[in-house]
């Protein structure tokens, strides 16, 4: 099967329908046990689209960093978060949508291309959900890069405050090192208490094991 290559066709179609400022939107951080969920909204200048834009998961960390720096220079980028407290209060899906809504609000957007199959309920502008959008739309691919690099850097900072959990390499995902550290070092203030491995340690006599 031919590999999908992100292009500008979704953006062009929205512009042809009368949109003036089309942004791509993606989030990262639904799966980790700690830290915020981070979203980015990106408007690309069609005449200054960086070479090599692709789904952030398909790129090396070094390439993501380079593209992030380029995007910050040539695109309009808005990045926002939903906190651990909001994740625990609202649930992770609603919190990720809240982060998206906040990111979009940081730009004068009138049309949003949203990665995934759901449009956040709180949006007051026209929007389109694009399944696997980070592999199809250049703007969504750009948003996926900006969100991931921002959140990865944030988790490196948190790893210095709470050493031993390996967040500088696992970004808070439930790796064996992270789960073992939860058992041995305990739950930090930035862990999501609504997530089962954390909840079990806090509230039940259940151990996390392989």
Image: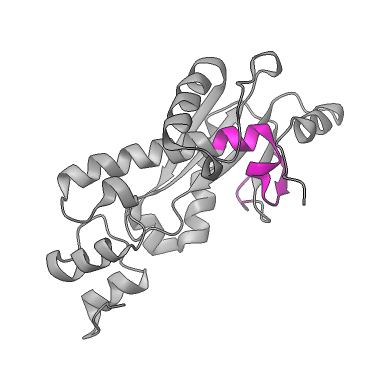
Q: In the orientation shown, which residue stands out farthest toward the front? A: 1
Q: In the orientation shown, which residue stands out farthest toward the bottom? A: 205
Q: Nearer the viewer, residue 189 or 137?
A: 137
Queried whether the magenta region covers residue 136, the answer comes back as: yes
Residue 121: x and y in percent read 63, 53
Queried whether the magenta region covers residue 208, the answer comes back as: no
Q: Toward which corner of the image does residue 76 lie, by quadrant?
A: top right
Residue 128: x and y in percent read 73, 45
Residue at point 21%, 68% (across, down)? 180
Q: Is residue 79 left or right of residue 2?
A: left
Q: Nearer the viewer, residue 150 or 126?
A: 150
Q: Nearer the viewer, residue 183 or 87?
A: 183
Residue at point 55%, 16% (across, down)? 74
Residue at point 25%, 62% (across, down)? 177
Vertical relation: 108 (above or below) 163: above
Residue 31: x and y in percent read 44, 59
Position of the C terminus, as image quadrant, is bottom left
Vertical relation: 190 (above or below) 52: below
Q: Is residue 104 left or right of residue 20?
A: left
Residue at point 23%, 81% (across, down)? 207
Q: Toward which corner of the image does residue 156 lie, by quadrant?
A: top left
Magenta residues, start to end: 120-143
């Amino acid at each position: 099967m031919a590999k999908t290559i992100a292009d500008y066709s979704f953006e062009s179609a929205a512009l042809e329908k009368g949109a003036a400022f089309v942004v791509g939107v993606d989030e990262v951080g639904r799966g980790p046990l700690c830290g915020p969920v981070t979203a980015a909204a990106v408007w690309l200048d069609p005449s200054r689209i960086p070479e090599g834009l692709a789904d952030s998961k398909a790129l090396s960390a070094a390439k993501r960093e380079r593209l992030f720096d380029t995007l910050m220079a040539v695109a309009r980028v808005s990045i926002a978060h939903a906190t651990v407290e909001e994740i625990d209060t609202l649930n992770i899906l609603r919190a990720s949508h809240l982060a998206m809504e906040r990111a979009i609000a940081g730009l004068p957007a009138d049309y949003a291309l949203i990665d995934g199959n759901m449009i956040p309920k709180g949006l007051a502008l026209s929007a389109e959900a694009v399944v696997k959008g980070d592999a199809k739309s250049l703007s969504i691919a750009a948003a996926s890069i900006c969100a991931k690099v921002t959140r990865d850097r944030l988790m490196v900072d948190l790893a210095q405050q709470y050493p031993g959990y390996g967040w500088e390499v696992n970004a808070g995902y439930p790796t064996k090192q992270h789960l073992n550290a939860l058992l041995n070092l305990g739950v930090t203030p930035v862990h999501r208490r609504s997530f089962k491995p954390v909840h079990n340690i806090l509230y039940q006599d259940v151990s996390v094991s392989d």
